[in-house]
Amino acid sequence: MATEVKLPQLGQTMEEGTIVDCKVKLGDKVKKGDVIFEIEADKATLEMESPADGFVKHILVETGQTLPVGEPILILGDRDEEVPQSFVDSLKAGAAAVPTAEAPPAAEPQAVAKLAGKVKASPRAKKLAKDLGVDLATVTGTGWAGRITENDVKKAAALTAAEPALGATIPLNRLQKITAQRMLKSKQEIPCFYLTVRADVTDLVEFRTKFNQTSDIEVAYNDFIIWAVAIGLEKFPIMTGQLTGDKITLADGIGVGLAITVPGGMVAPIVKNVSKKDVAEIARDSRALIERARGNKLSLADLEGGCITVSNLGAFGIDSFIPIVVPGQCSILGIGRITDACVPENDGFAVRKLMSMTLSVDHKVTNGAYAAQFLDFVRKLLEDPSNLA
């Protein structure tokens, strides 16, 4: 008997998905658990497994198509089973109203001729090109037989990343659309208050320099900050909470998001179980997340389980800023650049290194006094790196 396979909800917040790649073709035999599609959802590309055994009778979707959870995408049946075309047409008719990803701009005739009438690219390269707005017909492939790779797309995007002219219309890529939706949801549903302190990180700067001279992995300031935040969350656990009905549900583990700039936008994957790790272990996990994020290889698991996010714009010369809380988390910590400043010391002044920290907090979960104690505790940890010894 024919089995209608629908797009599953692959994550708690997933409402729709984009078909990145179809792993099967008509007539293929599949077993329950076999990977049949690659689906992009919530800033991650995920593998979709077959929910049943059978033979592929009809594929109802195309690569690049975006559709809501629950939409039929494939039909399985017995080897010799005939699936009525009227049944297939009825399913396709239901999917016809589903918005699809915008088609890439038409290639110039010369570019099409250059590629012998067909663009050869890996599924991931096609997806990345769509996200970054890169016309594959203009990209020279370096892969086998001239196939376009992800790296080719990244290079092409970098070469065409000139600032747009005034008056231009700039289409949003998928990552920008998701970010816009989530930030709007945050502003509409999370009543925030904001707290700002300046941490004297003079000793931390010196400690980090000495630490990296003997460590087998370079530790960034963000790794120290993530470590301090995790210790703070253990001491002030309400900062891990989420309001559910008339109760506050605390997280069962401490995960800290790290905001990372990627082509086309920003993502914030989660460093997991941070309170159980030392700074070097946090640094290794952070580096791995950064590599996966910039290689467009984050999984859904990388994006779930966060209590708080750390967003550091110091590298861009920003002194301080007010970040927006990620939906599903209680707070976000915005970090500014480290600057030299004269501060009173004994009977005179001394030059110290100061760093601004701004905490945005969901007022539904906690109050200003509790959050202030948390932020002050984190500040003190960073100001006294002997806690790391």
Image: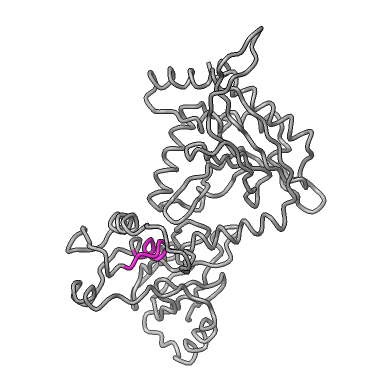
Residue 86: % across, % down: 48, 92
Q: Principal SS element in the magenta part?
A: helix
Q: Residue at x 80, y 48 (%)?
A: 247
| Image side of residue 185 versus residue 112, left or right | right
Residue 127 in the image: above or below residue 281:
below
Residue 110 in the image: above or below residue 260:
below
Residue 11: % across, % down: 56, 58
Of the pair 230 and 344, the residue shown nearer to us: 344
- Spot the residue most to the top: 347
Of the pair 108 and 331, the residue shown nearer to us: 108
Q: Residue at x 69, y 55 (%)?
A: 187
- Part of the protein shown in magenta: 126-135
Q: Quadrant of residue 132?
A: bottom left
For the image, the number of numbered tags is: 0
Residue 385 in the image: above or below residue 223:
above
- Spot the residue most to the bottom: 86
- Please say whether residue 10 is one of the residues in the magenta stretch: no
| Image side of residue 307 versus residue 113, left or right | right
Q: Residue at x 50, y 38 (%)?
A: 317
Q: Residue at x 49, y 22 (%)?
A: 205
Residue 50: % across, % down: 45, 66
Residue 13 in the image: above or below residue 71:
above
- Please say whether residue 129 is one of the residues in the magenta stretch: yes
Residue 265: % across, % down: 48, 54
